[in-house]
Each structure stands twice: as C-alpha cells, then as structure tokens.
Amino acid sequence: RQALRGAMPKPALGRRAFVGAAVGALAVAGIAVVRPPLGLWPAASTWTADFHTGTGEQQAIALAERIDVLLNTQTSVRRVEAGGRVVGMELLAGEAAIDLRAGSPAFQVAAGPGRSMAESGRFEVRYLAGRVCVSCLEGTVRVAHPAGERLLQARQQTLYDTASIGGVVGIEPAAVSAWRSGELVFSQVPLAQVIDEINRYRPGRVLLMNEAAGSDPVSGRFFVASLESALSQLQHS
C-alpha cells in the first residue's frame, strides 16, 4: 500500500504547542477537530471486501490482465468472476480508477444499483453516502441503472442513486483525477462538501460548527500530504 501522507517527524513540545494553537484558531473560525471512535474500523458492508484501503492510503491492484486499478482512500472492492476469470469488480465504498490498456477484455464495475461497463479507455467510479459518480476520462463507458442507461464519452460524467440516474455533464479530467497525484481540486464547491472530502484523507474528523457557512463556495488546489495547511487556508478565507 502506498500512503499519501509523508513521513512524520517525532513530536516535540514546540510542535505540540503549535498544533494546540492551530486547533484553537480553527475553533474560533467555527471549525473544530475531534477524534470520535467512529471510523476506526470498516463498515459492516465492506467486511467481505477482497481489497481495502485505510485513511490516507492508495493501492494499485491487479484484477485482470492489462487492466490497471487504483483504489483511493477508504475504498473497499470485491472481485466479480465468471467462467473462472475476473470480469469486473464491485465497489462497496470509496473511489476507484480503472485504466484499460490496449487488448484488455471488457470490464465492469458494480456500485449500488448500477453497473459501469467499458472495453477500452479510462474511467473512475466514486461511491459515497449512497450516491455514485461515474466519470469517463478516455474512450466510452456505458452506465446501466434500473431507471435508464447513459453512454459516456471522454470528458463526461453522470450521477445516480438508488432511485434515479442523472443526465450527462462535461468534466475536466485533470481535476477529477487529481487525487491520483495526491491533490484535491475544488471549483466553487460548498464548504461543507469540501470538509467532507478532507475528512476522507486525514485521521480524526473536522466538524463545521457554523452551519450557515456550509454553503459558501470554495475554489482551490490542496495537497493531501499537507491538509493541515488546507484547513488553515480555509480558516483565513
């Protein structure tokens, strides 16, 4: 497994004092950092996963020949086999990137009530809080859902949940895939959603105390390896 966080120096009294002051400043800004017992173990729905990543980790896995899969932080997946070979995977939670090299077999990703199928190209599937987001970076991806189907071309995306599937919208692949290189990119995203995303990548939990600020738009590029700096930037802005 590849940890996104860099090596941490041994704690010192000066560092403890600095962290204490930083937490105090965040509290003044309406943001509190806590470490509840929740989140210390995977959800029951992911216990049968074949692969799982922890907080702040990424993992490259080999499921089938000429198919590269990269799991993002807090992600659980299970193999899907047919005829003695792997034909896809089930995304139980989290986010995965699938790159199909030339000559690879067709591959499908099941997430919630839908399935995403491709024979070439690159796509990503994100499954969080009951919602699934499928992004096509290269090639084409067919998304099948009980409420309908969507055919995604390169630079397109769709969303679905248990009840419905949305339309097709355009995306910027570099922003969608920034997590692969350890970055988080936001463009006019509500502050509450930004904090939810940051919580996926760091131990503990950040809480927004001022609910009225949750809808404030945030734009920026933050490095996963230095999310404490990102929190400070959010405080000052």
Image (spheres, helix red, strand yellow):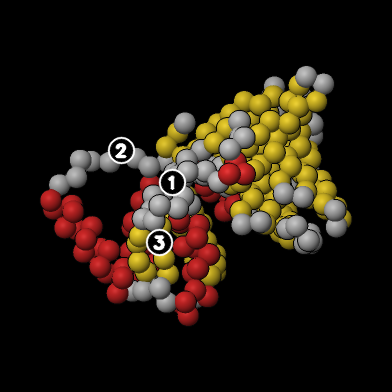
Q: Residue at x 61, y 30 (%)?
A: 50
* Relative side of 94 to 196, left or right: right
Which residue lies under the disc numbered 1? 40
Identify the residue at horizontal 72%, vertical 49% (top origin): 112
Spatial CA distance of label 1 from label 2 is: 21 Å
The mark closer to the camera, 3 or 1, is 1
Q: Is residue 139 above or below residue 131?
A: above
Q: Earlier in the sequence, mark 3 or mark 1?
A: 1
**Contact, CB < 8 Å: mark 1 with mark 2?**
no
Label 2 belongs to which residue? 7
Query: In the rendered image, which quarter is residue 79 located in?
Result: top right
Mark 3 belongs to which amino acid?
A: Val
Q: Earlier in the sequence, mark 3 or mark 2?
A: 2
Q: Earlier in the sequence, mark 1 or mark 2?
A: 2
The residue type indicated by label 2 comes to Ala
How many C-alpha atoms fall within 10 Å of the one at disc 2: few (<14), some, or many (≥20)?
A: few
Residue 70 position by quadrant: top right
Cα separation between marks 3 and 1:
15 Å
The answer to whether one can see residue 196 in this image is yes
Give the amino acid at mark 1. Leu
Q: Which residue is mark 3?
A: 206
Q: Is residue 235 left or right of residue 90?
A: left
Task: Tell which tag, 3 or 2, sits nearer the viewer.
Answer: 3
Q: Are marks 3 and 1 in contact (CB under 8 Å)?
A: no
Judged from the image, the secondary structure of the residue bearing numbered disc 1 is loop
